[in-house]
Image (cartoon, rainbow, N blue to C red):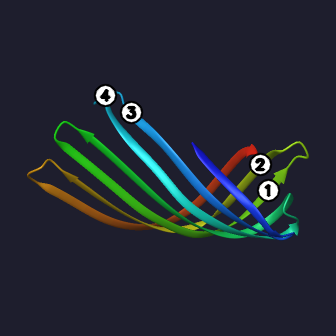
């Protein structure tokens, strides 16, 4: 589940906070992976306005994950930052649709240990940034 709260700084500028949390279960190994995210966006509405408009923006997202199975424990975390162009449409009753497409740079690190041996790996990548949000505005 993810929640985004965008605050209208001015009729053409918005700042958003993003938070998310979830758990995925691997049915084969019966292992649960806990995932969380925290981030922020800044949006400049260049056509239209805060409720209905084309915007340019940037986002930074931190994501973390952890899992354990038997004696093995694993953690991972990453940071992604990028820019995008998007469109937001908010109905007068509150239904809201946001689509954003851009480019981002991401770095991630992971560590796993069984109490005796520990393995770690870090990697960075560049690639597409895509957000599709459907929800309700208050």
Disc 2 vs disc 3: Cβ atoms closer than 8 Å?
A: no
Which of the two labelled residues, at mark 3 and mark 1, occupies the earlier sequence position? 3
Q: How far apart are marks 2 and 4 (CA)?
A: 36 Å
Q: Which quarter of the rendering shows the N terminus?
A: top right
Quadrant housing residue 13: bottom right
- Badge 3 density bin: few <14, some 14–19, many ≥20, Cα 10 Å: few
- Badge 2 density bin: few <14, some 14–19, many ≥20, Cα 10 Å: some
Q: Which residue was labeled with disc 4?
A: 28
Q: Position of residue 41 (x, y in %)?
A: 65, 66
Q: Say whether residue 125 is left or right of residue 132.
A: left
Q: Nearer the viewer, mark 3 or mark 4?
A: 3
Q: Where is residue 19 in the image (x, y as percent from the top left)?
A: 57, 53
Disc 4 vs disc 1: Cβ atoms closer than 8 Å?
A: no
Q: Distance between the residues labelled 4 and 1?
A: 40 Å
Disc 1 secondary structure class: strand
Disc 2 secondary structure class: strand
Quadrant housing residue 109: bottom left
Q: Is residue 91 above or below residue 42?
A: above
Q: Distance between the residues labelled 3 and 1?
A: 33 Å
Report the disc number at residue 25: 3
Q: Distance between the residues labelled 2 and 3?
A: 29 Å
Q: Which residue was labeled with disc 1?
A: 88
Disc 1 vs disc 2: Cβ atoms closer than 8 Å?
A: yes
Disc 2 vs disc 4: Cβ atoms closer than 8 Å?
A: no
Q: Which residue was labeled with disc 2?
A: 97
Name the residue rendered at 52%, 64% in the picture.
Answer: 127
């Amino acid at each position: 589940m993810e929640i985004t709260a965008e605050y209208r700084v001015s009729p053409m500028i918005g700042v958003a906070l993003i938070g998310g949390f979830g758990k995925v279960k691997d049915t084969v190994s019966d292992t649960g992976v806990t995932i969380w995210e925290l981030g922020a966006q800044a949006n400049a509405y260049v056509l239209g306005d805060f409720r209905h408009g084309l915007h340019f923006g940037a986002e930074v997202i931190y994501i973390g994950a952890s899992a354990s199975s038997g004696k093995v424990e694993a953690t991972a975390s990453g940071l992604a930052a990028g820019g995008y162009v998007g469109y937001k449409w908010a109905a007068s009753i509150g239904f809201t649709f946001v689509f954003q497409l851009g480019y981002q740079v991401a770095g991630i690190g992971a560590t796993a240990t069984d109490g005796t041996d520990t393995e770690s790996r870090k990697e960075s990548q560049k690639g597409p940034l895509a957000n599709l949000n459907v929800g309700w505005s208050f």
